[in-house]
Structures are given as structure tokens and as C-alpha cells.
């Protein structure tokens, strides 16, 4: 994919994540909807027009270039088994790595984890040695992986933390602002189930797109959220209870 194509792909995905249509964008940059569609289709962006479109979408041209460069990499990736083992064995290191993945600066990492300079440097050195991050001057670190990491389903991080994460995440009535719980059960064909599974996978990719898009926002403009996707063959235990009751 050419650089122009990657930039246009990022613009389209950003429009989608912002919930904007070509018509919405046209109104913000004083062009007709047909003109906007033609610009995207023919890749005829002047720098001035590109800047206006970025401003309308709510990103800078620098962020656009960074996100287009990241399209060389998949939305998510797996760490090596050795890297996962290291993180699973050291909770503070895993927490530090997680905060780096979310774009948090060193000062906030220190405050969140109650670390002094020496302790933070020690964590950064461990991440550097594991090729998870690069230690930079001024007590800073730059990730070598990401921006989204998938943990192995049978890996050490999942084994250590999955039960705890599930229990804590589900300790809610999901009735508050910004909370949602949807549960559906039905009998589906294999083809329909496969299609639904692909849609759920796509939703996971869109979640990763949002994370990439908002990664460099100021801390005050974002909050930590989690998305739990679950899908499997399942029969409600109530039916077994009814069946046994008749015997």
C-alpha cells in the first residue's frame, strides 16, 4: 500500500470512529459531498485541504502521519513467550508496560505506581532488555511493540490475571453512564455463527483503532475503559434443571 493510500485509509477509519459521514465532513470544510467523495476517490489532497480535513475530524496532520505509519503493523500483535513470562512474573513491570501502551508519560507512571526515579528507571531497563521498550534520555521510554497487544489465550499473563480480571470487570450492574451489557442467546446455523464471530472480531479491531486514535490525547480528555467480547456454544443451565425435575 502506498503512503497516500495509507493516509486516506486512516482518514476513512477516523471518520468512521468519529461517527462522521462524507456529508458531515463536507459541511465542515465548505465543499459539496460530491467534491469530498471525489477528493477521496482520486486522492487529490492539497496540503491546505488535508489540514482543513484533519481539523474538521479533530486530529493534527502529525497524528495522521503517525497513524498512517503504524498501518505497516497489524492492529494487534503477540509478544514472545519469554516476554509474557517476564511480565507475568513482575506485576509492577506489567503495570508499567500497560501504562506505556496507553501513552502515559513517565511522570504519571511514577505517580500511579508510587515510584521514585531509580525504581522507574529499573523498570524501563527491564523493558529495554526484553525489547519491549527503548530506554531514552531524561527518564523516558519508547515502546518497541504495540500499540495494541494480544495476550496468548493459554499464556502466562492470561493464566495469572484472567480470573481476577473477569471477576473485577463483572462486578457491576452495568447501569451507569458509559456502561453497557448486552446478552443474547439463540439457535444459529454454523454459517450465521461464523459471520457473527467475524463481526465480533471486527469490533475488536475498531476498539484498537479508537485506542490508537486517542493515544496521544491529554489525560484529562480520556479515561480507562474495557471491552469484553465473549461468544461460544452454550445452553442455559436452567434447561438442565427443568429436565432433571421431570425425572
Image: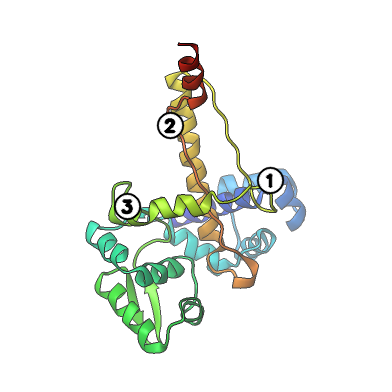
Residue 78 screen position, x and y as percent: 32, 54
The residue identified by callout 1 is 21
Image position of 200 with respect to 138: above or below: above
Name which of mark 1 and mark 3 comes first in the sequence: 1
Kindly identify the residue that appears in the image at 33 percent across and 75 percent down: 134
- Towards the viewer: 158 or 23: 158
For the residues labelled 2 and 1, the Cα–Cα distance comes to: 34 Å
Crowding at dot 3, Cα within 10 Å, few <14 / some 14-19 / many 20+, comes out as few
The residue identified by callout 3 is 159
Q: Residue furthest top?
A: 247
Kindly identify the residue that appears in the image at 55 percent across and 60 percent down: 213
- Towards the viewer: 134 or 89: 89
Crowding at dot 2, Cα within 10 Å, few <14 / some 14-19 / many 20+, comes out as few
- SS type, badge 2: loop
Left or right of 62: which side holds 180?
right
The residue identified by callout 2 is 232
Nearer to us: label 2 or label 1:
2
Name which of mark 3 and mark 2 comes first in the sequence: 3
Crowding at dot 1, Cα within 10 Å, few <14 / some 14-19 / many 20+, comes out as few
Residue 39 screen position, x and y as percent: 62, 50
Nearer to us: label 1 or label 3:
3
Kindly identify the residue that appears in the image at 67 percent across and 48 percent down: 19
Left or right of 41: which side holds 144?
left
For the residues labelled 1 and 3, the Cα–Cα distance comes to: 42 Å
Residue 189 screen position, x and y as percent: 46, 18
- Towards the viewer: 22 or 144: 144
Residue 247 screen position, x and y as percent: 45, 11
Name which of mark 2 and mark 1 comes first in the sequence: 1
Q: How many marks?
A: 3
Please indicate, yes or no, whether residue 155 appears anywhere in the rendered image: yes
Amino acid at each position: 500500500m502506498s503512503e497516500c493510500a495509507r493516509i486516506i485509509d486512516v482518514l476513512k477509519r477516523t471518520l468512521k470512529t468519529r461517527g462522521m459521514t462524507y456529508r458531515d465532513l463536507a459541511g465542515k470544510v465548505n465543499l459539496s459531498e460530491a467534491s469530498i467523495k471525489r477528493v477521496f476517490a482520486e486522492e487529490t489532497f492539497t496540503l491546505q485541504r488535508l489540514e482543513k480535513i484533519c481539523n474538521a475530524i479533530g486530529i493534527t496532520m502529525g497524528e495522521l502521519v503517525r497513524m498512517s505509519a503504524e498501518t505497516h503493523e497489524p492492529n494487534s500483535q503477540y509478544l514472545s513467550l519469554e516476554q509474557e513470562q517476564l511480565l507475568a512474573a513482575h506485576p509492577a513491570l506489567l503495570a508499567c508496560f500497560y501504562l506505556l501502551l496507553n501513552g502515559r508519560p513517565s511522570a504519571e507512571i511514577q505517580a500511579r505506581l508510587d515510584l521514585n526515579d531509580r525504581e522507574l528507571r529499573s523498570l524501563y531497563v527491564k523493558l529495554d532488555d526484553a525489547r519491549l521498550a527503548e530506554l531514552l534520555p531524561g527518564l523516558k521510554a519508547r515502546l518497541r511493540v504495540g500499540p495494541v497487544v494480544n495476550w496468548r489465550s493459554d499464556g502466562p499473563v492470561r493464566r495469572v490475571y484472567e480470573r481476577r480480571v473477569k471477576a473485577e470487570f463483572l462486578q457491576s450492574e452495568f447501569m451507569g453512564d458509559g456502561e453497557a451489557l448486552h446478552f443474547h442467546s439463540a439457535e444459529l446455523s454454523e454459517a450465521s455463527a461464523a459471520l457473527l464471530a467475524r463481526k465480533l472480531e471486527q469490533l475488536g479491531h475498531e476498539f484498537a483503532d479508537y485506542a490508537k486514535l486517542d493515544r496521544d490525547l491529554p489525560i484529562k480528555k480520556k479515561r480507562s475503559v474495557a471491552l469484553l467480547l465473549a461468544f461460544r456454544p452454550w445452553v442455559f443451565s436452567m434447561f438442565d434443571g427443568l429436565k432433571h425435575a421431570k425425572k
